[in-house]
Image: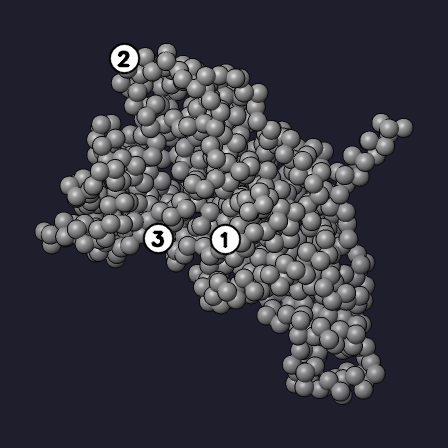
């Protein structure tokens, strides 16, 4: 893991001191809420329906056990004993008191953490593959690039007042778990014909009101020039992005309006100028310095077979179920990637209590090199677990209600906070996700249905990523009544697509039945080996529409 | 309104001239439109001349004329509108402009640090800004991760200086 040096530490401490001053000015009445707003928004503090909300940055979703314990402590002391992991791999606290936030920031700084750029129209936390470093077929650990981007983008003087928030994601495997094509910039690590590593740069993807899949603008950016290229994209956007109309201010709209070709031309022109100066060229020593922090842990030489685990699985169905869905293949023989579901049946997706965080920290310390990842699907991951430890890990997770065997299945849903917390929302999201989860809680049924992503957002800002859910649910308000619009066929991976609206929206009372109808229709007509997304891609909307609206 | 130039609170000798107003006798800052229309007359005047660019008027529009201006004033119509940060960097780094780059409009204390970093050397600020506030706001961070127009060494280069010192010491 990356560790702060004196420079990183000083910067974060100076930031805490600055924010402490700003909070003091607010509490003393020197600043009105209006004047305070842009300042708190630079530091992850939102004013929500009921209270201030604090968003803590988890750079590229990587945490040490020590940091997880600190988060547990903060949630317990300054909040109600739980936190909420977000689709940006961050952690949100829903109930902190404004007066306590400087103290929370001090606590965070003591474990090399902060809330910098978790809100505001700046470059947000760069996200990545939660299997980074452990995924088979990975070209390099994408977190090295993420850390380079983190430093470059932190308090960037030119890009702290962009037209809109700006999100970057990095993937280093062909199978994209970081959803790079629905980010403002997606960076894909690639290898060229001569075996040299470089970056594909995708620009202008995004969800929100007008979902658009990004366009490939950079085909092969050399490693040393990545920051020059990113600076070029950001500069073009900062100068040409719309500022007159909030809902068209994203880079998605710029690319859409001028076209991908023109965008590419502008970026390359700017890139050449920046590159000429050499100012942002990455010295190999700096790359090496950061790379060292992400060196693989001390893996043992192990056989890939784990007969004792297979034997236990044969005896205990619950363990076998969990192995089937929550454990993924590791690049090193004898190791596995363990996903921790934060989606227990009927609970709020992404919520985690202080006790659970502490349990995860302990388990990671004992079995996973003290490292925990946050997945953008709002789950956690232990990226390096010996296969022979899987049973013990499962037992320990299960004891803390962290072993729901549903990762990637229908009850592993993404949902935004919705009307229960958020002052932008039009409808509730969490209760819908909870009811779907209850409806499909049968493990065998879930496995029969196979991989299926249901994403729910409580408004068109799409924090629940509904556009890229295999089934997407969008809450809308029609004259004070909550309705739910359903899309099919969305995907966030390398086959990224925006879902298609099935038809008129459903009431709160109808929505779970509608999902059930979609699932049953798929089960009826699917061919061997198909998941719902495949079936939809083969047959289109029609068969689903017929069933959904047959009675209407 | 007061003027801070290179960190000092000083009297402003410049007048912003509206397009319909007559030019004063002394230093004048005019709009891009006026410059484009009255270029010859403005130069022939023989008095210090400045130009004021609105958000959306990129410095490339005046790149060829920069030697005619002692001041380029860049407008912030709202603190949220950050276009002029890019404009300032382009003026300094791309076009090598050495004259005054002045921030006008919605210029708040929490922007000072960023403004100075991208090459503004003059800021028109609200009257409630004191030298103490200026000092605190502009000096909020000792070091910076990225290179910019202020020419300060980035953290990256400081790290390598330190590493080089250390290895030189070890070698000695």
Q: Judge from the rendering whether residue B131 lies leftward or rightward of residue A426; answer left or right.
A: right
Q: How many marks?
A: 3
Look at discs 1 and 3 and give the one toward the viewer: 1
Q: Judge from the rendering whether residue A417 lies leftward or rightward of residue A230; answer left or right.
A: left
Residue B111 shows in the view: no
Q: Residue at x 30, y 42 (%)?
A: A454
| Residue indicated by mark 1 | A202
N-terminal-most mark, 1 or 2: 1
| Residue indicated by mark 2 | A315
What kind of element bears circle 3? loop
Residue A308, image x, y percentages: 37, 11
To the question of a shared chain for discs 1 and 3, the answer is yes
Mark 3: give few (<14), some (14-19) or many (20+) Cα within 10 Å.
many
Residues under numbered marks 3 and 2 in contact, where contact means CB atoms less than 8 Å apart: no
Q: Residue furthest left?
A: A551
Residue A182, image x, y percentages: 43, 50
| Residue indicated by mark 3 | A498
What kind of element bears circle 1? strand
Question: What chain is tagged by disc 3?
Answer: A
Give the image quarter of residue B165: top right
Residue B76 shows in the view: yes
Residue A279, image x, y percentages: 72, 52
Instruction: Look at the picture and state if A430 lies above or below A462.
Output: above
Instruction: For marks 1 and 2, give the CA distance.
Output: 47 Å
N-terminal-most mark, 3 or 2: 2
Q: Which quarter of the rendering shows the C terminus of chain A?
A: bottom left
Q: Residue furthest front?
A: A194
Question: What chain is tagged by disc 1?
Answer: A
Q: Residue at x 37, y 13 (%)?
A: A307
Question: What chain is tagged by disc 2?
Answer: A
Instruction: For marks 3 and 2, give the CA distance.
Output: 42 Å
């Amino acid at each position: 893991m990356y560790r702060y040096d004196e420079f990183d530490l000083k910067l974060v401490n100076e930031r805490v001191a600055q924010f402490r001053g700003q909070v003091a000015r607010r509490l003393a009445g020197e600043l009105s809420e209006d004047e305070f707003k842009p300042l708190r928004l630079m530091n992850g503090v939102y004013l929500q329906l009921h209270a201030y909300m604090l968003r803590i940055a988890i750079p590229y979703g990587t945490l040490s056990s020590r940091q997880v314990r600190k988060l547990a402590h903060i949630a317990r002391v300054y909040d109600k004993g739980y936190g909420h992991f977000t689709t940006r791999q961050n952690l949100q606290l829903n109930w902190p008191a404004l007066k306590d936030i400087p103290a929370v920031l001090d606590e965070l700084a003591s474990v090399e953490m902060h809330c910098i750029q978790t809100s505001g129209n700046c470059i947000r936390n760069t996200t990545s593959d939660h299997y980074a470093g452990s995924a088979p077929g990975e070209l390099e650990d994408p977190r090295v690039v993420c850390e380079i981007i983190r430093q470059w983008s932190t308090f960037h003087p030119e890009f702290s007042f962009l037209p809109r928030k700006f999100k970057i994601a990095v993937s280093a495997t062909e199978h994209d778990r970081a959803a790079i094509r629905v980010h403002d910039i997606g960076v894909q690590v690639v290898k060229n014909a001569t075996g040299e590593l470089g970056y594909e740069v995708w620009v202008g993807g995004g969800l929100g009101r007008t979902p658009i899949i990004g366009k490939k603008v950079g085909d092969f950016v050399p490693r040393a020039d990545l920051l020059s290229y990113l600076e070029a994209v950001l500069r073009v956007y900062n100068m040409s992005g719309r500022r007159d109309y909030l809902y068209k201010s994203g880079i998605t709209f710029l690319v859409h309006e001028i076209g991908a070709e023109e965008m590419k031309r502008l970026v390359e022109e700017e890139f050449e100028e920046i590159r000429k100066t050499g100012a942002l060229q990455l010295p190999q020593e700096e790359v090496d310095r950061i790379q060292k922090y992400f060196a693989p842990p001390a893996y043992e030489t192990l056989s890939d077979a784990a007969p004792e685990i297979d034997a236990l699985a044969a005896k205990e169905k619950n363990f076998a179920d969990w192995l089937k869905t929550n454990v993924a293949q590791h690049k090193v023989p004898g190791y596995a990637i363990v996903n921790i579901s934060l989606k227990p049946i009927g609970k709020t997706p992404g919520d985690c209590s202080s006790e659970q965080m502490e349990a995860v920290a302990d388990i990671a310390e004992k079995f996973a090199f003290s490292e925990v990842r946050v997945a953008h699907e709002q789950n956690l991951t232990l990226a390096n677990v010996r296969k022979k430890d899987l049973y013990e890990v499962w037992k320990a997770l299960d004891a803390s209600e962290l072993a729901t065997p549903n990762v990637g299945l229908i009850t592993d849903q993404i949902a935004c906070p919705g009307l229960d917390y958020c002052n932008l929302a039009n409808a509730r999201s969490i209760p819908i996700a909870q009811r779907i989860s209850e409806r499909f809680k049968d493990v065998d049924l879930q496995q029969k249905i196979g991989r299926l992503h249901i994403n729910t957002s409580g408004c068109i800002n799409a924090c629940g990523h509904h556009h890229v859910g295999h089934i997407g649910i969008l809450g809308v308000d029609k004259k004070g009544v909550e309705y739910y619009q359903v899309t099919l066929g969305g995907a966030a991976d390398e086959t990224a697509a925006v879902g298609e609206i099935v038809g008129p929206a459903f009431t709160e009372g109808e929505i779970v039945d509608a999902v059930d109808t979609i699932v049953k229709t798929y089960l009826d007509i699917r061919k061997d080996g198909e998941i719902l997304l495949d079936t939809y891609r083969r047959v289109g909307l029609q068969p689903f529409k017929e069933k959904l609206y047959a009675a209407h | 309104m007061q003027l801070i130039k290179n960190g000092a609170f000083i009297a402003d000798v410049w007048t912003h001239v509206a397009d319909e107003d007559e030019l004063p006798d002394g230093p004048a800052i005019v709009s891009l439109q006026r410059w484009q229309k009255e270029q010859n007359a403005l130069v022939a005047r023989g008095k210090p001349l400045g130009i004021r660019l609105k958000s959306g008027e990129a410095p490339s529009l005046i790149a060829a004329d920069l030697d005619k201006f002692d001041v380029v004033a860049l407008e912030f119509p709202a603190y949220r509108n950050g276009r002029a940060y890019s404009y300032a960097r382009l003026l300094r780094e791309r076009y090598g402009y050495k004259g005054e780059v002045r921030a006008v409009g919605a210029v708040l204390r929490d922007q000072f640090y960023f403004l100075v970093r991208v090459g503004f050397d003059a800021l028109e600020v609200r009257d409630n800004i004191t030298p103490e506030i200026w000092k605190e706001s502009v000096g909020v961070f000792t070091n910076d991760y990225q290179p910019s127009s202020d020419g300060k060494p980035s953290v990256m280069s400081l790290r390598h200086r330190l590493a080089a010192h250390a290895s030189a010491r070890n070698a000695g």
